[in-house]
Amino acid sequence: MNDNIKHLLFELEEQLKFIDLEQDDPIKSAQLCIDVCLKAISKLKYILLKHKFKNQSEEIKFFKETKPKFLAPLIYHLKIYKIESRKPNGSNDIRRKYLLHELDKLKHYFDSNLDFYRYYRTQSNYLDHKYFIRGKYDIRLTVDSFFFEADERVSTSHDFKVAKILAHDRLQVYLEEELSNLDRKESGMITQEAPKVKLYWTESKTALIELIYALHSQGAFDNGRADIKDIAASFEHLFGVELGDYYRTFLELRMRKTGRTKFLHSLISSLTKKMDEAEEK
């Protein structure tokens, strides 16, 4: 892979991770990610127009493996934006029906492109010279209509299909997690009398995850015997928040070069300020 393209892909992935970590609103997150993806793809096109592949194998590798890594996040976040912005208000049954319908759409695309799915999943290569070389296409090989409007200098007949497979894999996980969250909400309902005042967590989910891991590290519950899963579940129920994959978020916090405990430091600062103000009165 060209060093410039490799660096561009690394920057794209890092920016997307940062947005995912810092932005809890799925619609706002999708908007930011779409913008980042479009800029990266524009830069990729500029690099590609100036780049000359050494041979056919290098060209195939780029359009089969590299370019889809730029396109897949864009397709995924466009889908998320559409799904979240159209998500109906109402009962869990209404939302479940909506999410299941979105899963059905993925299955329909899979069924419509079954031959290529099999080809790609089995890591076949006997048709790569038709699928992933520019200016080559065979109408009998299920070419998407968008291809005829694409810039053939930077596109092949099937690089977009590979990107859709990658995006749909991730989207399926997202939809299944949303359905799982609905099930957890229903199974977690309790009959005991609720407190007169319901508190909702209004800081970011990342901040709450940082706090949960800090308390777990301190051994603040059950003399240090409490499992992180139980602590997280308790906080989710207590504050009416869904933390999602909190372990992955913790890994992202660990990978931060600076500000790994940003929220904890802000707590110290806020409490110290309040104490100082109380002493001045």
Image (cartoon, grey):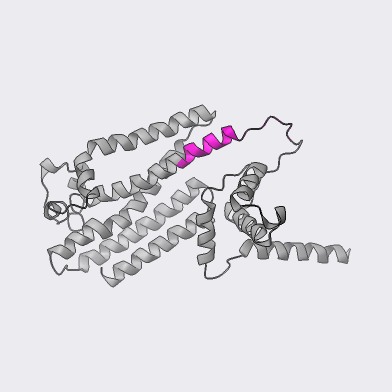
- Residue 176 belongs to the span the image colors magenta: no
The percent coordinates of residue 106 (x first, y second) are: 33, 38
Residue 178 lies within the magenta run: yes
Q: Is residue 239 left or right of residue 46?
A: right
Determine whether, in the image, residue 270 is placed left or right of residue 124.
right
Type of secondary structure dominating the magenta stretch: helix
Up-down relation of residue 212 to residue 4 (above or below):
above
Taking the view exactly as shown, the residue that stands out farthest to the right is 281
Say how many tags the image has. 0
| Rendering coords of residue 137 (x, y %) | 12, 49
User: What residue is rendered at 61% in x and 56% in y?
Assistant: 207
**Residue at 49 percent of width and 28 percent of height:** 94
In the image, residue 235 lies at what x, y percent? 65, 47
Q: Position of residue 3 (x, y in %)?
A: 29, 72
User: Which portion, as a residue range, is magenta?
Assistant: 177-194
Q: Which one is in front, 267 or 87?
A: 267
Q: Quadrant of the C terminus?
A: bottom right
